[in-house]
Image: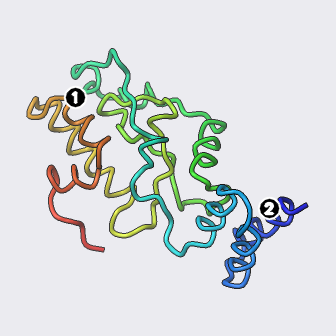
Amino acid sequence: MQALRILAIATLIAFTYSVELCQTCQTLCQFDATACRKACDVLCSKEPSPILPDRSKTPGAIFQNATVDEVCEPGYAKRHRNVSEALKKQVYAEYGIFTHKAGDYEIDHLISLELGGSNDITNLWPQSFITKPWNAHVKDTLENKLHELICSKKVPMKTAQQEIATNWIDAYHKYVGPTPSE
């Protein structure tokens, strides 16, 4: 019964953000499971998260046989992109995101396909489009820069994969430049 009340409140929060509803959700979860508290935190936050993926869920994964020549072929990423809606829902659930507005997040490849990343769940995470300054658009800039650098043989593919998987914001500073302005 408690779980149904929490689910009903969480659904209502997703459609009509309200401080009172969030406080109610958090009160109901106070003595409940961690997942419930996390769901309330995500639903009630004013700034979407995560900005960085949880490394225990998304350490990054690559196509083991991908070569620089292959990933640098035009159309490579399009030919290899294969993430089902069911897998996307699973990723959102693992991160405690049970509802969200269209355009708030994308299921992103931590190591992008253009860098030899795979479609495995260990390489996927919900990345925000609306957090500032760090969001999916900014990470796309980094991915494009790293793709350019590996294709011009200025950075080894393995290095690009490791750096973006370790901390994409640090990699942005190293390869693109200072924090983008909002």
Residue closest to the eye, 31 or 60: 31
Residue that badge 1 annotates: 158
Label 2 amino acid?
Answer: Leu
Q: Position of residue 5 (x, y in %)?
A: 85, 66
Residue at image point 51% right, 46% down: 107
Q: Report the number of numbered marks.
A: 2
Residue 7, labelled with which disc?
A: 2
Q: Position of residue 25 (x, y in %)?
A: 73, 72
Left or right of residue 104, residue 98 in this image? right
Q: Determine whether the residue tagged by mark 1 lies in a helix, strand or loop.
A: helix
Query: Is 146 situated above or below 32?
Result: above
Quadrant hosting residue 115: top left
Left or right of residue 26, residue 145 in this image? left
Residue at image point 43% right, 25% down: 79
Label 1 amino acid?
Answer: Lys
Quadrant hosting residue 135: bottom left
Which residue in the rendered view is the most extreme toward the left?
A: 154
Sequence-wise, which precedes: disc 2 or disc 1?
Answer: 2
Which residue in the rendered view is the most extreme toward the bottom?
A: 20
